[in-house]
Image (spheres, helix red, strand yellow):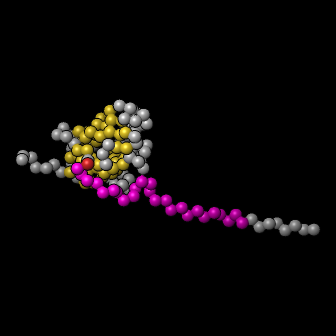
Amino acid sequence: MSRALAPRWLLGLGLALVLTACGAGPAPSVSKADCAKADASGVILISAAQMRFSAPCMIAPAGIAFTVRFTNRDSTPHNLAIYDSAAKATRLFSGDPFSGPGITVDYAIPALAAGEYYFDCMVHPADMRGTLFVEAATPAGS
Ligand SMILES: [Cu+2]
């Protein structure tokens, strides 16, 4: 009695998983009135609480270094990273993550050209993200 060998059909499982970039969907419409804006000294105040940034966007001056004064109100570590766009092809800045609650760190951001950038917390990029508007200075005097 001869026994035929069962053919093995393990010819490779082609898993064509098309994964879209996590969290990089269309940006929600943002009103600049809701943004955290740099003060006259070039300092932007923003905080994180319950896994959210306190503002959906930030406004910074173009062409000069500025400071993001970041308060973490969670015990979870957070940070701030800035990218050229929501596709995050180029990371322009990343601060060291730190835990709170109630800890504030100044992040020194290098000068950026006018334009629209993207930021997130690298620990929670899906939940903590927003738009950074870098704007040319408005003419002095009013
Ligand atoms: Cu975070």
* Magenta segment main secondary structure: loop
Which residue extends farthest front?
Answer: 50
Residue 59, percent across and down? 24, 47
Q: Write the start and end of the magenta stretch as one range.
A: 9-33
Give the quadrant of residue 39: top left
Q: Residue at x 18, y 51 (%)?
A: 136
Q: Is residue 134 visible?
A: no
- Where residue 82 appears, as percent x and y from the top left, is 33, 47
Q: Residue furthest top?
A: 102
The quarter of the picture where residue 68 lies is: top left
Task: Please state, as top left, top right, bottom left or bottom right, where the N terminus lies in the image.
Answer: bottom right
Give coordinates of residue 40: x percent, y percent.
17, 40
Answer with left or right where residue 33 lies relative to residue 18.
Answer: left
Per the image, is 22 magenta? yes
Residue 125 covered by magenta stretch: no
Residue placed most toward the observer, 125 or 47: 47
- Is 103 above or below relative to 59? above
At 44% from the left and 54% from the top, the residue drawn is 22
Q: How far from the left and from the top, in percent, is residue 106?
A: 30, 35
Name which residue lies at 27% across and 43% down: 110
Q: Is residue 4 left or right of residue 98?
A: right
**Res. 1 in view:** yes
Q: Is residue 106 shown left or right of residue 121?
A: left
Q: Residue at x 34, y 43 (%)?
A: 53
Residue 76 to residue 85: above or below: above
Numbered label tally: 0
